Image (cartoon, helix red, strand yellow):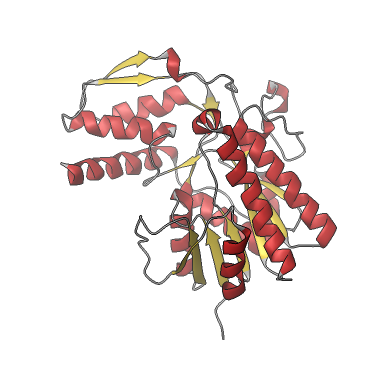
């Protein structure tokens, strides 16, 4: 019996790496799409290809050869902070890249199931009475990243309705874990704690807005949710993926500091504040649970402990 073949775009990214491992454990034939060969892929059994998601010609070559049963579209510019600095790049990768992928699948008449990864940021500011946010909430994106993801959702829905394509939608809230690069709150804090412990940084961490509350999940739970959406969800349906609770950024920092034996000073840097910052956001995950049985298992404290240990090891390797 032939293995089901999956293609993961953005496979060399943080979530792509975990999804690749998870699917290989389930005995899928995994193909990967990356931008370049500069970073090594830890899984030698992946059939790796390199292409620019914004190039229809390059994407066509890969899909003609791969003929995937499932496509997990993870390739994206996924930093909210960077999206303020590079809005055009964010829109090009996240929107134009998705259009290229969907249009190529349509032209090649592939029957691939496709998972598009959106973001809880699409919902924008919410009133307390609207929490937790369910999928019926009208999006109101407030930054270039969330706007690009909302446009991606609209485009995906158009292809689903117009062409009957098997497109699924995950609206993912914040997820983190070992291996996430700096530029996101948890690795930013954890890497600095580890650097301070190693004597490479003054025992001070400069922070932005600590009062914002976000829905944090472990990436290892999230990739399982993605698989269950494709296998048990309904095409044309949006599923929130999150923990179902709000965690203040202050709590993230406090827990990381408790995991360290060093005395670390915290200083507020107003330059780190975003032009628009949603005060609180967290997901209702009842639809995903009811339709697929998925629920998160990994506790935040374990995620933070594992992430800090990852950065301790990274810094030791760099010494």
Residue 135 horizontal side relative to residue 201, left or right = right
Position above or below: 195 against 208: below
User: The C terminus lies in which quarter of the figure?
Assistant: top left
Q: 300 or 78, which is in the foreground? A: 78
Image location (x, y in percent) of residue 88: 59, 36
Position above or below: 206 against 310: above
- Residue occupying image coordinates x 60% and y 23%: 278
Image location (x, y in percent) of residue 301: 39, 37
Residue 17 horizontal side relative to residue 319, left or right = right
Quarter holding residue 250: top left
- Residue occupying image coordinates x 65% and y 48%: 96
Residue 11 horizontal side relative to residue 143, left or right = left
Q: 209 or 9, which is in the foreground? A: 9
Q: 83 or 223, which is in the foreground? A: 83
Position above or below: 228 against 88: below
Whether residue 221 is visible here, answered yes or no, is yes
User: The N terminus lies in which quarter of the figure?
Assistant: bottom right
Residue sitting at the far right:
162
Image location (x, y in percent) of residue 295: 57, 49
Quarter holding residue 56: bottom right
Q: 70 or 239, which is in the foreground? A: 70
Image location (x, y in percent) of residue 249: 46, 25
Whether residue 118 is visible here, answered yes or no, is no
Q: How many marks?
A: 0
Position above or below: 120 against 199: below
- Residue occupying image coordinates x 74% and y 58%: 234
Residue 111 horizontal side relative to residue 164, left or right = left
- Residue occupying image coordinates x 69% and y 24%: 126
Residue sitting at the far bottom:
1
């Amino acid at each position: 019996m032939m293995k089901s073949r999956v293609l993961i775009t953005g496979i060399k990214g943080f979530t792509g790496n975990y999804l690749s491992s998870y699917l290989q454990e389930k005995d899928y034939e995994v193909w990967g799409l990356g931008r370049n060969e500069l970073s090594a892929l830890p899984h030698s059994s992946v059939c790796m290809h390199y292409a620019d998601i914004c190039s229809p010609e390059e994407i066509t070559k890969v899909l003609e050869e791969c003929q995937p049963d499932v496509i997990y579209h993870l390739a994206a510019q996924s930093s909210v902070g960077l999206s303020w600095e590079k809005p055009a790049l964010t829109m090009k990768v996240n929107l134009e890249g998705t259009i290229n992928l969907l249009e190529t699948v349509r032209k090649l008449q592939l029957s691939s199931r496709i998972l598009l990864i959106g973001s809880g940021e699409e919902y924008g500011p919410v009133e307390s009475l609207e929490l937790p946010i369910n999928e019926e909430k009208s999006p109101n994106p407030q930054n270039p990243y969330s706007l690009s993801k909302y446009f991606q959702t609209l485009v995906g829905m158009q292809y689903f309705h117009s062409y009957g394509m098997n497109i699924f939608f995950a609206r993912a809230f914040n997820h983190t874990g070992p291996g996430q690069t700096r530029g996101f709150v948890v690795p930013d804090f954890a890497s600095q704690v580890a650097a301070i412990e190693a004597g490479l940084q003054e025992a001070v961490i400069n922070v932005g807005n600590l009062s914002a509350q976000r829905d944090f999940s472990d990436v290892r739970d999230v990739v399982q949710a993605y698989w269950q959406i494709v296998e048990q969800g309904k095409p044309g349906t949006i599923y929130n993926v999150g923990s179902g609770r709000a965690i203040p950024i202050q709590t993230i920092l406090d827990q990381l500091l408790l995991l360290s034996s060093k005395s670390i000073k915290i200083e507020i840097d107003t330059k780190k504040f975003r032009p628009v910052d949603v005060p609180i956001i967290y997901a209702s995950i009842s639809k995903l649970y009811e339709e697929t049985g998925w629920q998160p298992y990994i506790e935040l404290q374990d995620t933070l402990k594992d992430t800090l240990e990852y950065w301790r090891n990274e810094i030791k390797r760099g010494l």
